[in-house]
Amino acid sequence: MIKRHITSTLIISAILFATSCSGNTDKENTNNSLDINKAFLRNVKTTTATLSDQLEELTLTGKVEYDPDNMINYVPLINGVVERSYFALGDKVQKGQTLIDIRSIELSSLQAELVTLESEVKIAQRELKTAQAMFEDNMLSEKELMESQGKVDQAQAALNRVRTDMSFWGSNKSNGSFSIKAPISGYIINKNASSGTPVSPDSDPLFAIADLSTVWITVNVYASNLLFVKEGMDVKITSLSYPGEVFTGKINTLSQVFDPEEKVLKARIVMPNKDLKLKPEMSVLVRLENKTNNRLVAIPSDALIFDANRYFVVVEESADNFKIKEVAVQGHNKDTSYIASGLLEGEYIVIKNQLLIYSGLKEN
């Protein structure tokens, strides 16, 4: 701790000595110096050091991502060719909206089988109706009636199977074509389909739809941050895209395995995105706060003076009487610093013009 005391006149005289004009009389110099000292002291501001619980703060980087539970990639189940697409990348689509028409030889065979089976069901139903009438007239045995019923059931089962198979591929348009409809409402986030594009079960997804009403924010947590970051912590999220706007959320999950490439743990924040301001791949800053049980002296961070790898503050001990104190800083929280030693609760800390006073005290 620097224990030198000095009055305001000596401090300011030392600071402003160089500004005195050599051509003036001693009396004029003295009067000017006193006037400047008074003006300077009126601009000196102090605040009281207070005792409070330490609030730890950590800022991490993150990225907005799609919610995979609300996203669908469509991969065709058969071979064919895209006849037409009805959407563009970024379009908003509604569930059930037609997106693509595909022509397929495999589908043509299924359509022919569908027509055959529909005919067989109708024939079997007519035969069953006749068998029931003959059974009522005692012209047909119960066994023969059951056989007729069995033929109807078999034909109907085969027809249902083909219809189910075709429903996986889309809406039947006949002539070997079918339409792919949007399975969910959302936004087109990927498109690999245009007229003439060949498709197969091994090809890339023709399109992807994501419901952006909910998004994930993935946060990079480094090994040195593990003791600070916990599941359930409240967070504040900011982005350069929206200066001054703060989004609030909570850490839902924290991975237990380090990412092998980035060497970080991934924390996940599930965020409602009602106004769709949070765009996938957008970079964000995530601020976490944790109130501890450590009761420490708190002062504005601007009051700290860093010199020779140590921290100092200027204390006003009485009216216009200042002293330099060396302090040990426990931690910072945005605009507040927490002091472990060197400063007492209730002391008056200079927060304006402290650098000038500090320089004056060091020179005397």
Image (tube, helix red, strand yellow):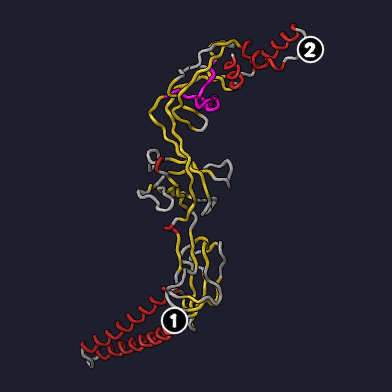
Look at the image and give the residue range highlighted in magenta. 296-315
User: Circles 2 and 1: CB distance less than 8 Å?
Assistant: no
Q: Which residue is mark 2?
A: 23
Query: Looking at the image, which is closer to me, 47 or 187?
Result: 47
Residue 70's disc number: none
- Residue found farthest to the bottom: 139
Residue at 70% across, 12% down: 33
Look at the magenta stretch and give its main secondary structure: strand
- Examine the rendered structure and indicate whether residue 346 appears above or below residue 125: above
Quarter occupied by the C terminus: top right
Residue at 37% across, 86% down: 122
Alpha carbon of mark 2 to alpha carbon of mark 1: how far? 105 Å
- Examine the rendered structure and indicate whether residue 152 appears above or below residue 233: below
Residue type beneath disc 1 = Leu
Mark in front: 2 vs 1: 2
Q: Which residue is mark 1?
A: 107
Residue 106 point in image, percent of width and height: 43, 82
Q: Please give left or right for residue 205 compared with residue 255 in the image.
A: right
